[in-house]
Amino acid sequence: MKLKANRLNKRAEFGEMVAGDEVNPNTGDSIDVFQSSFSRYAGRYSRSFSQQVEVAGTTLEDTSVIVIRHTDKVNDQMKVKFDGDLYNVVSISSDDSTAVSYDLITVRKYVVAHG
């Protein structure tokens, strides 16, 4: 995939949700907070019109794609903090075929489950 490096102009933090110090007064459970493990320069990857039509009506309809330089550190159990929002990793399309390669990471906005 050809991509200009200057498109990777934001930081994406990758990590997990961990129990925080605050407690929910209604349930007594600790409130989970995002804990970053590492970060990478990233950018939004725009889907073409035909790609948008392809995902319409599927489980990928409410997702977006971010691109980072290739790394084996990312997995689909992680959360991503990008551009002020928190996301779940849905899938990873990795490319390690060349020295300068990129990963397309499909993400969905993280929604807090309220019991």
Image (tube, rainbow, N blue to C red):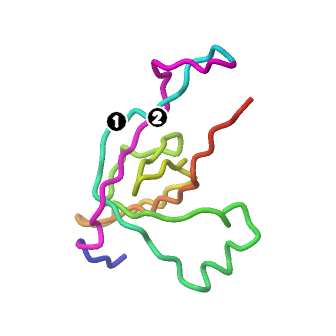
Q: Is residue 114 above or below residue 74?
A: above
- Where residue 71 sits in the image (x, y, percent)? 33, 51
> Where is residue 97 drawn, in percent x and y?
33, 65
Query: Which sits in the foreground, 78 or 97?
Result: 78
Q: Are marks 1 and 2 in contact (CB under 8 Å)?
A: yes
Q: Position of residue 90 (x, y in %)?
A: 57, 52
Mark 1 neighbour class, 10 Å CA radius: few under 14, some 14 to 19, many 20 or more:
few
Q: Indicate the amino acid at tag 2.
A: Glu
Q: Is residue 75 above or below residue 50?
A: above
Under mark 1, the amino acid is Ser
The residue stretch that appears in magenta? 6-26
Residue beneath the point at 31% across and 41% down: 38
Name the residue at 43% across, 59% down. Answer: 94
Disc 1, SS = strand
Residue to which mark 2 is pinned = 16
Query: Circle 1 sits on which residue?
Result: 37
